[in-house]
Amino acid sequence: MPKERKYRADSDYIFVRRKAKLAQSDTSSIYTQLVRWLQANHALHDGEFYFSDGTVTTLNVLRYIDVPFDLGNGWQYESYDSVPCSLVPSITSIAEDQLGTRTGAMRYHFRHRESGAQCHALAVTVPLHDADLMLVFRSLAYVPKERVPQWIAFEKECKRIENSAVQFRGKVSVVGGTESTFASNITLEDVFLPHTLKSEIMRDIDAFFQRGVDIYKRLNIKPFRKLLLAGVPGTGKTMLCSALANWATQRAFFVAYVSGSSTFGARFWKIHQALEMAASSSTRAFVIVEELDAYLQDDESMAEMLNVLDGLETPSNPFGTLLIATTNHPQKIDERVLKRPGRLDRVFVVPEMNDRESVERMLRNYIGDAWRDEHLAIVDELLGKPGAFIREMVLYALTVSAYQDEELLTLGHLQESARLLAQQLDAKDDFLTRHKQEDIGFSATTKRSKRAQDVPF
Ligand SMILES: Nc1ncnc2c1ncn2[C@@H]1O[C@H](COP(=O)(O)OP(=O)(O)O)[C@@H](O)[C@H]1O
Ligand SMILES: [Mg+2]
């Protein structure tokens, strides 16, 4: 470094130190104090200040940066370390069991690939309360003037990671719902469906990500596959989606669940937003859309949906995006969607409980310790019923026998429960219909679901 420059930097440094001392007693804002602290602790002659949210000090983001990370013009980001700061102590939050945002000062080390020249940026992050008394983090960075483009590239990468799948690993991102993420612990074994159906779905998924994505790319088509699970209400489509979401998050896929349950209801932009998140996730992605028919109620939504299904308006994910949609009313899905090849790649029919073995496994599962072999006698009666019917029947029978202080769950309890339930359904009881609407699940709230045929089984 030329002598003169060093001298100037030092003199600035001393000058600022002196100024900072003078300012100690004044009531200047936190930012003025931060500016002074940064100037005093970074021997920079010519620096610029940058505001940002706390992303650059989020440890959970920094650990995913692939170092050395290219910042353009031969410069690379190499590492960070923490710097003691008299103004803001270093405190780390824990988010989703991992180290989250950190307050206090941090130094970011940049190096030029060829010349080996080094420089650094210094940033302080403070916790603040916004108008709603929410805790927010704000960072102020002090960056060498000539390295500003590199700092912008660095921040951009931090933001990209924060918005990408990384932070959601093991979690499902909810688009348009009341919660932002949820963890699914349902496994494929929990869903009682004919083995052939489950294995066909899994084979389809596997083939798409193992071989399909490359083929699509070779043919210059966006790697985007669309499956539809169709069946009457209560056959386990939602449950199957949860199990698939769990399966995918365990394999570090990005999974977005489009929810029609928030105030905006089943709106097309939610699907588009989920596809965009998938495209920027830098990994294989699932986008789950429940009750697809609810999104296709007017011509405008239909036109938008057709464009997305055709891939015209689909943000492209080079790692592949699989859209899994469900419907209780395939007949409500326009022929333009259902019949034209390529719009929906495959439709899987999720059936009622049609085989003895599945019914028996389900019964044993729900009845648990109260199981007795005499219960087998009800299996035949349950063939053709949706899974949700069997679950409700068992729950009801179990509660009745518990309330009556009876030690055994008898076949009679089950039969009586099945009879009452069937009766209720026949009457298309209003109460049950309303109850379904208020269901706390992720089911879409649609105009349709006010109708009696949407009783969950
Ligand atoms: N095939 C199934 N296997 C296991 N449980 C099922 C099955 N079908 C329905 N159920 C039970 O019924 C409930 C409602 O089913 P759900 O998945 O919401 O049906 P759908 O989405 O097809 O309307 C589930 O939470 C589950 O407890
Ligand atoms: Mg459902």
Image (spheres, rainbow, N blue to C red):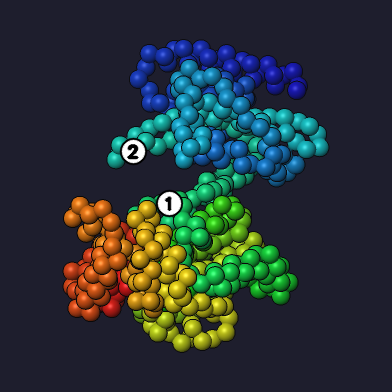
Q: Are marks 2 and 1 in contact (CB under 8 Å)?
A: no
Query: What residue is drawn where x is 46% and y is 12%?
Result: 21
Q: Position of residue 393 (x, y in %)?
A: 29, 66
Give the numbered dot on residue 406: none
Decide which of 329, 199 is in the foreground and name it.
199
Decide which of 328, 377 is in the foreground and name it.
377
Query: What residue is drawn where x is 42% and y is 64%?
Result: 362
Eye-nearest disc, 2 or 1: 1
> Any atom of ligand 1 within 8 Å of the CB at mark 1?
no
Residue beneath disc 2: 134
Q: Is 264 displayed left or right of 22 in the figure? A: left
Q: Quadrant of the C terminus?
A: bottom left
Residue beneath disc 1: 182
Q: Position of residue 233 (x, y in %)?
A: 36, 73
Decide which of 108, 8 is in the foreground and name it.
108
Q: Quadrant of the N terminus?
A: top right
Position of 105 relative to 297 (above/below): above
The answer, for residue 34, to whether it is visible in the render is no
Q: Position of residue 121 (x, y in %)?
A: 61, 31
Query: What residue is drawn where x is 40% and y is 37%?
Result: 136
Q: Is 442 displayed left or right of 225 in the figure? A: left
Position of 191 relative to 407 (above/below): below
Amino acid type indicated by mark 1: Phe
